[in-house]
Image: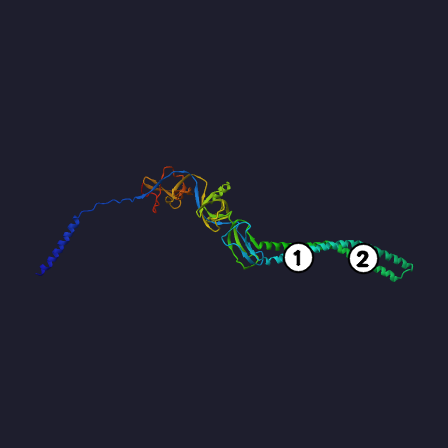
Amino acid sequence: MNKKKVFLPVLLLALGIGGFAVLKNTKPKPPVVAPKEPVWRVQTIVVQPATLSPVTSLNGRVESPEQTRAAAPSVGRVLRVNVREGQAISPGQTLLELDPRDFQPRVDQARAEVDELDAGIASEKLRHQADLEQLAQERKLLEFAAADVGRFEQLREQNFYSQSAVDQSRQNLARQQITLRSRELAVADHTARTSQLQARLSKARANLDQATLAAQRSRVVAAFAGYVAKVEVAVGDQVNSGQSLIALYPSAGLEVRAKLPATQQDAFIASMRRGEKPVATAKVAGEVLEFSLARTAAAADARGLDAFFVARRPSPNLRVGEFVSLRVSRAAEKNALAIPYTALFGGRQVYRVEAGRLQGMDVEVLGDAGGESANAAQRLLVRSPMLKKGDVLLATHLPNAVSGLKIEVVK
């Protein structure tokens, strides 16, 4: 009885395993599927080489080479400030005044010194004329004194005069010689005294000119039409000599300093040496302004070379310190291709479509496409000797684009 209970489960287990093996061996096998190469659906463009003018986009800042700062000519106090920052100014307009009471006394003092020395020179001339006239008289008196000495000595020998009378005549002669020498020295010293007075007069006149100029500069007057960049003082401020009062710049002659790319600076420099002046345009406050490349900086750095574009006409919308985007038209290039930005990979490569697959090739980037249309603003000019008319280029920017990749062109 116990053997039957053990055998029956074992039999059932064996039958189950055998049935599972039969079913596994008789199940249908799935068909083998060959791996399929992925195909990327893309858009393309047809190559049409032409002679086109590339455009370089630059970002620059407006500067004024003639921006000036008016400084205080001397110590004084601000009396009036007639303008505010950003205000337009016209030639001859009085912008700021310092108190004239701080400057006029210095002018009067300097002028008094000049008048005093003028009078001193006139007095010296009169004195010199008198010395010349007296010199002739002194010489005659000396002759008379010498004659008296001779006469008294002769009479003394004849015992007509005493020795004391002879000595007295000799003293008179000595005194007259001293007087004559003093007069001759005064005449000879006239040139030196006059030169000294003239030097002092020149110094006094220089002080007068300086004081007069300081008084004139105490009124800041606009020399050109332009704008007030900054007012640095207020009414009642005490200012020192040389302290900045107000900053101005003319509305004409404003220029934009922009950095030329290192890859294009040689082309710009060569065009300037040929006498060409590339023209740039910029839209400022809705107004389209034109600029001409005037010059380049003397030194470059790793980022490129600074260039200065001068505005062809004044504009109230152009202000110093403003950032401006320039589009610079360059000389036309032969065999240039206008392609969308999405067709350029890695900054220097495009893909040609050959038999449904991609073939990569390097190109020379010339710049943006010219023109004002929306399509032109979004296209790039490139050139490659390997591309010819009718070639098809990939226009969809694929992140995994490589040579040999299979694609399907979307019409």
Crowding near the residue tagged with mark 2, few <14, some 14–19, many ≥20 C-alpha atoms within 10 Å? some
Front label number (2 vs 1): 1
Residue drawn where x is 9% and y is 59% of the image: 4
Secondary element under disc 1, as helix, strand or loop, is helix
Mark 2 or 1 closer to N-term? 1
On residue 265, the disc is none
Q: Mark 1 belongs to which amino acid?
A: Ala
Q: Nearer the viewer, residue 120 or 374?
A: 120
Question: On the image, numbered disc 1 is attached to which residue?
Answer: 112
Q: CA distance from mark 2 to mark 1?
A: 41 Å
Left or right: where 100 falls relative to 48: right
Q: Nearer the viewer, residue 128 or 188?
A: 128
Query: Quick one: label 1, few (<14), some, or many (20+) residues within 10 Å?
Result: some
Q: Relative to residue 406, is residue 165 depicted above or below?
A: below
Residue 4: tell me if it is visible: yes
Q: Position of residue 39 (x, y in %)?
A: 30, 44
Q: Tell me the residue that label 2 is attached to.
A: 177
